[in-house]
Image (spheres, grey):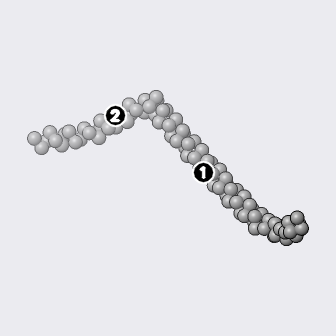
């Protein structure tokens, strides 16, 4: 019994000394988690911004299609292909 009591007085200071590295390790892990969460929040903001840009582009495309812009584009393409047909017919 006396042997155990003498070891307790040795183990208590050793435990106190061993807590310091453990605390430092915990602080390091906390900083790593903070940085990871900051990066995740930044990526989420970038994705949200990119999604908003894509939504805006889709709105513009919908407006072009519904506002006869599609017909205008088809007419432009028809005009582009017309000179090529004339050139092919003149070669024959």
- Quadrant for the C terminus in the image: top left
Q: In the orientation shown, which residue stands out farthest toward the left?
A: 92
Q: Nearest the camera: 74 or 39?
A: 39
Q: In the orientation shown, which residue stands out farthest toward the front?
A: 1
Position of residue 13 measured from the top left corner of the image (x, y, whole percent): 85, 70
- Answer yes or no: do the residues labelled 2 and 1 have beta carbons within 8 Å? no
Give the residue number, with chain letter if any, for mark 2: 75
Residue at 32 percent of width and 38 percent of height: 77
- Sort mark 1 into few (<14), some (14-19) or many (20+) by Cα contacts within 10 Å: few
For residue 70, above or below residue 39? above
Position of residue 31 measured from the top left corner of the image (x, y, whole percent): 71, 60
- Quadrant for the N terminus in the image: bottom right
Give the residue number, with chain letter if any, for mark 1: 43
Of mark 2 and mark 1, the one earlier in the sequence is 1
Residue at 85 percent of width and 66 percent of height: 4
How far is mark 2 from mark 1, CA to CA?
42 Å
* Residue 33 in the figure: left or right of residue 7: left
Kindly identify which numbered label has been placed on residue 8.
none
């Amino acid at each position: 019994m006396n042997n155990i009591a003498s070891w307790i007085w040795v183990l208590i200071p050793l435990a106190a000394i061993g807590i310091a590295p453990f605390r430092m390790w915990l602080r390091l892990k906390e900083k790593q988690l903070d940085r990871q969460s900051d990066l995740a929040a930044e990526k989420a903001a970038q994705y949200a911004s990119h999604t908003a840009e894509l939504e805006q582009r889709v709105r513009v495309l919908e407006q072009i299609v519904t506002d006869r812009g599609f017909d205008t584009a088809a007419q432009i393409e028809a005009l582009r292909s017309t000179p090529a047909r004339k050139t092919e017919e003149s070669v024959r």
